[in-house]
Image: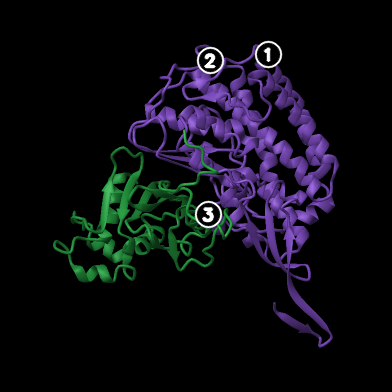
Amino acid sequence: MNNEDLQNIIGSWFPNPEAGNVSEVATISETEEGLVESTKTEEPVNPSLLEFTKESCQFLNITVQPELLHRLMSQLKSNSETNFDYLFCLSGVDWEPELGVVYHLESTIHRHTIVVKVKTEDRENPMFDTVCNIWKTAEFHEREVFDFFGIKFSNHPNLKRLFLTEEWEGFPLRKDYVDDINMVIK
Amino acid sequence: METVTINNNFKSEEYFINMGPQHPATHGVLRLILTIDGEIIKKVEPDLGYIHRSIEKMCERDSYQQIVHLTDRMDYLSSHINNEAVCLVVENALEIEVPERVKVVRTILSELTRIASHCLWWGVMGMDVGALTTYFYGFRDREMINDIFEETCGARLTMNYNIPGGLMFDIHPNFVKRTKEFITHFRAKLPEYDTLLTGNVIFQKRTKGVGILSKEDAISFGASGPVGRGSGYSCDVRKHHPYSAYDRVDFKEALKMEGDTFARYQVRIQEMWESMTIIEQLIDNIPEGEHKVVTKVVIKLPKGEFYQRVETARGELGVYVISTGTKNPYRLKFRSPGFSNLSLLNHIAVGGKIGDLVASMSTLDLVIPDIDR
């Protein structure tokens, strides 16, 4: 499936409340097949929830609001048209000032790829929903992100430091991390 | 601690045991915290970070040429393929088309790397389950490949032969001859691997039906390489996202449906045969031409995000670069195959014996610096 089709399908899950029917959004997970059929008409995506970008990236990118992350991800996996069952990369990124997570997804059936991004400006207590009940590989990857970026994942079964010791202070892969002993600044 | 009374006479108690960080079966500094009841494993919790060097943070201050050199300190048995991943991401971002000669030589060396890595794995796998002789057979054949590497680029393990834009030097005049000699030698020797170990009754009893991983779980855990293919999951990056010269060679993706330790073992043996087929198709037709494209001394990637996937001996390595247009990457993430493969160890080991854990872990073929990047 090409990127335009993907964008249309995913966009149809989150229609613009001004243009579309709001009540349909609430029952999205129950009647996913019917909803996809009924809203396939070119309905503008709600720009406050999802944002699509293709510039300067080789894959289709979606930036999603944190509160919608888990719903979007489970849709991406379970919907038979998208069927993203393989999470092949999960990276934490410090965009300064935002912290975020990037999910690279592929479908082993349709062989299409998508990148989902989620960002927050809260550097003190960044928190996203876990996706490890959708893809089991996320459990270790999210622990790595927690270890190096301090991003917490709600409902994660075992969220603790993976590589560093429990006593370690700070989160080394953040851009504002300072360590005079271990870091060599050129 | 849970205490269970059996038959009102004997008490069974769960307890913890440390496996590693210097345990020979972990092949490096990996510590496993096992919760066991008698000899039945209840939980496997890996403790990582003994040799974490934070390569991703180092990459943020290094130039792209320097990053290539860091990558062979990750999975040192696939160093050439790791180097290639970074070179490809830079070349794709800069839209450099490397000469045909470079693509073919890279592919031949990648497959030699894969055979060398699998030889070592096979030797150590046998040793893990108690067959010491395999170690010497595996290292004997791997040595010939290391000699080819040494003659080609001066290094036997951390090769650094790839640079963004091509190869550091042209191949040695003996390269074709020695590679052919090796293939002739190894075609005669690889059947010995089967007669020595594969058909062995004790070995089969140790591995068949042990550490079963279903296809659904393999995909969900992000398994790749021989671990995924042993569960019937077609995940070969060389087939699905061909790079270098893989689009022009004919080879079969080794697939086994059983998902147990023996299936993963058979996949790797089969992969060695396929690697030889790939090399034979290319070795006589290395195109003439330049061995590199001259790039700028200071490489600056355009603003944007780039992702490159390659198939190392362990599975899918991903390089994710976020560039802001400067000479360093803003963020560089390595998706290492060993990390995802390790995450499923608990799943396949629970309910088995400690001896089964050793056998299962051997076929995951973990290289710890690849996990502790």
Which-is-in-front pick, marks 3 and 1? 1
Residue of label 3: B219
**Residue mark closest to the camera, 2 vs 1:** 1
Label 2 element class: loop
The crowd level at tag 1 (other Cα within 10 Å; few <14, some 14-19, many 20+) is few
The kind of residue tagged 2 is Pro
Q: The chain drawn purple is chain what?
A: B
Q: Do badges 2 and 3 share one subunit?
A: yes
Q: Nearer the viewer, residue A186 or B126?
A: A186
Give left or right: position of B318 versus B13: left
Give the labeled residue for mark 1: B174
Residue B228: x %, y % from top left: 58, 49
User: Mark 1: which amino acid?
Assistant: Asn
Q: Quadrant of the N terminus of chain B?
A: bottom right
* Foreground pick, B194 / B350: B350
Looking at the image, tell me whether mark 3 or mark 1 is earlier in sequence order: 1
User: Are discs 2 and 1 less than 8 Å apart at CB?
Assistant: no
Q: CA distance from mark 2 to mark 1?
A: 16 Å
Q: Chain of mark 2?
A: B
Of residues B210 and A124, the one nearer the viewer is A124
Please name the color used to draw chain A.
green
Q: Chain of mark 1?
A: B
Residue denoted by label 2: B287
**Residue B21: percent from the left, percent from the top?**
71, 52
Helix, strand or loop status at disc 3: helix
Q: Mark 1 falls on what kind of element?
A: loop
The quadrant of the picture occupied by the C terminus of chain B is top right
